Amino acid sequence: MKCPKCGINLLDHIDVCPFCKTPIPKNTENAEATTEEKQPVRQPASVGGNTGRYAAIDPDKDSYDFDLQYTLTFRDSGEIKQAIADMDAEISRDSSKKKIETHRETSEPRYSLEEMQAAALRAQERRERRKNAAEGGKRKRPSHAEKRRSDALRAAKAPKRDRGTHISKDASVKSKKGLFIGIGVLAAVVAVIVGVVNVVSYFAHKTPEYPTLYTKGNELYSYYDGDEIKLSGNFVTAQLENSSDAKKDESGKTSSSSKSSTTKKLVDPKVPESKKLSEKDFIKISDDGSVVYFLENVNMNTGSGDLVYYLNGKEKSRTVVTQNVYCDFTISADGSTVFYLKNTDGSGGHGELCRWTASDKAEMSIDTDITSGNFKPSVDSMSITYIKNFNPTVHTGDLLYTGFGEGAEKQKRVDEKVAFVFGTTAKSNVYFYAKDYDTKKGTYNLYIQSTTEGPKSVAENAFLAPVISKKSDSAYIYSNYSNNFQTLSYLDLTNGSNNKLSDEVSEIVRVRNDEGAVVFSRAYETDKADYYFVSAKSPNVQKVATAINLAAAAEDARMVPFDASADFSTIAYVGGYDTEKKKGALYTLSVINDYASSEKRISDDAYTCNVSSDGAVVRFASGYNAEQNTVNIVSYSNSNTLSLADGAGMGAFTFDKSGEYTIFAKDFAEDPNTNRKSASIKSVTSKAKVKDIDNAAAAYGLKSDGTILLKKEDTETGNMCLYTSTVKGGKPDKIADGITNVLFY
């Protein structure tokens, strides 16, 4: 339909031309409609031709695309009618599914405004999903005005009526008025829906924040959710006293170590080594980062202090649990429960074992005369197994079990002459422990027991502790220790099977994320080992790494000779590492359906390697410069090697888990007045785009959420301050002043 005065194309329900205000006669309308019906269907505009506008109907795009065709509203009624016909079809399909009534009287619109709005919204969502898939999710954001116009057109389908039926001007105005009200409601509803979806999506996928804990002198602070909170005003009361390496007996004479030097002492990894305590040993954080337990008023010489509970972000939640607690305390994964020893002697022995929960804030005494390291709570913290009356000379004691909660079995003695308690399975009904311990060889027999079944021996002459599953009732266990090798087996408690996986095993190096396979080492020399892959279901042992330099890795913690993705789909290792040149050959291979592929040599010069969590990216340090003490950062992905950064400080680089960013320090400098060293901190993406994070930083740390912590000196006050930045750069924000040490982040 065209205006008889200005000739512009109009929609068929228009009574007055919106441009020249000329009334539209009915006979002109009918004649125009007849003329329009005889016109051929317009073809899509050629892709190569420049028409100055978008095509309303493009086979390569969505035919129902109002965002692209808005400029045609008053210029091409044929295309608009086709678009409305498309909308008609969409509503018909939707109505057949949702049983919307579409048969109306001829004097009424075929579809209600609500039906058209709902269909338009659904079609828009389908269109956007297809566009995002085709364009990789990248789409130009429309302006606010364009969005309003597209929303208006999306809801503005004209009522279909008989040619001979008269609609008055007042009715037309009311229809338009109702239309514009509907447009506003639709826009508001869409905005609310989008906002709710975004908020829900944000909280559903947000990575839990891990607190940053640091000290200011002797005060302990936490930075969490944008706020700094003082946790303790007196963190350490008594500092560690200096003691001579040579111990003295009761007579005051220095004991000689010549006798012990002739006899090689057993180094048993199951027995915790005595070490010099640090401030970190008095703090424990729940797995999700929500809860912090720490000791205050600490005596570093006895390893004890007052136990404090704190729920991050809740200043009033701080609760002093009890006093004189030894630092060997254990918390549940969610931080709701803590097990601890109090009133121990100077070495953590003869203490009272207690349990405390945040829900009732009440202490429960479990038993007395318990030694540090001799208790293991269940996964759900609803039971505990522990050794009582422990004799350190023969390394044995009595094994007891205590359950918690309504109807739980209370304290009972389950076995005797027990050397170690290892823990329970995921369902908390089977616990593992060691008997028949040989203090000279370090071997033991492995037993299991549950609340319903008595003790059962499942492995003999084992050396290393079993690896108990955290997801199922199973474990990887050792046996038959001889000449530094053991037999590795998979114990499945659901069906009672105990399948041998391999002989000549040194130790398990890595467990797959589903716990259905492991990588273990086989040390054929004192300083080198080969690594093997084996599945728990199909024990087909396959070599995945050759000539790993164990001695170099033990001496240099920054040198990582082996890494794998969480699902073992990608494995990388540095073979034939030369300690002096600090380089070896870098190899990669994949494990698909429990079968290892042939390895591929991707570099002859690698110092350390890293595999992203999904296995898509392998990164490594290369080109060690002994004079400058620097390396280069390189990535390998999709069979392509890319240099990411040059001149990174040796050991001063951090790979994120996703493979997207690497943080590194370079351009080191030293202040001659203070002797303080600093460096420039930078980030580099997987596409080698370098961002400046900050200059003159004394230290940095990368949090799991991508936040970068920077420790640097305030030029005005001379105090050390803590700043935060992101991997994308930008001006760092100061969060703390006058800090001493950063303990956790």
Image: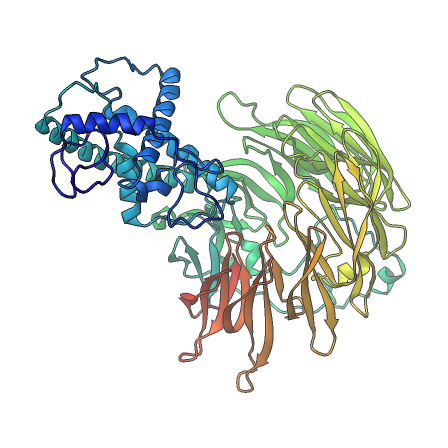
* Relative vertical location of residue 699 with respect to residue 553 in this rendering, above or below: below
Left or right relative to 676: residue 249: right
Q: Is residue 46 above or below residue 538?
A: below
Q: Nearer the viewer, residue 726 or 498?
A: 726
- Residue 344 at least partly seen: yes
Q: How is the image coloured?
A: rainbow
**Image height of 314 relative to 582, above or below:** above
Percent across and percent down for residue 578 are 83, 65
Residue 624, given in percent of the width and then of the height, sits at: 74, 70
Residue 707, horizontal then vertical, whole percent: 49, 57
Where does the image place residue 351, in percent across and percent down from the top left?
58, 44
Q: How many marks?
A: 0
**Can residue 322 be spotted in the picture?**
no
* Furthest-left residue in this view: 170
- Locate residue 181 relative to residue 490 in the image: left or right: left
Given residues 315 and 270, the one toward you in this image is 315
| Quarter of the view holding residue 414 | top right
Q: Nearer the viewer, residue 531 or 76?
A: 76
In which quadrant is the N terminus drawn?
Answer: top left
Q: Residue at x 38, y 15 (%)?
A: 96
Image-based side of 192 in relation to 595, left or right: left
Image point 64% across, 61% down: which residue?
276
Q: Quadrant of residue 228?
A: bottom left
Residue 695 or 280: which is nearer the viewer?
695
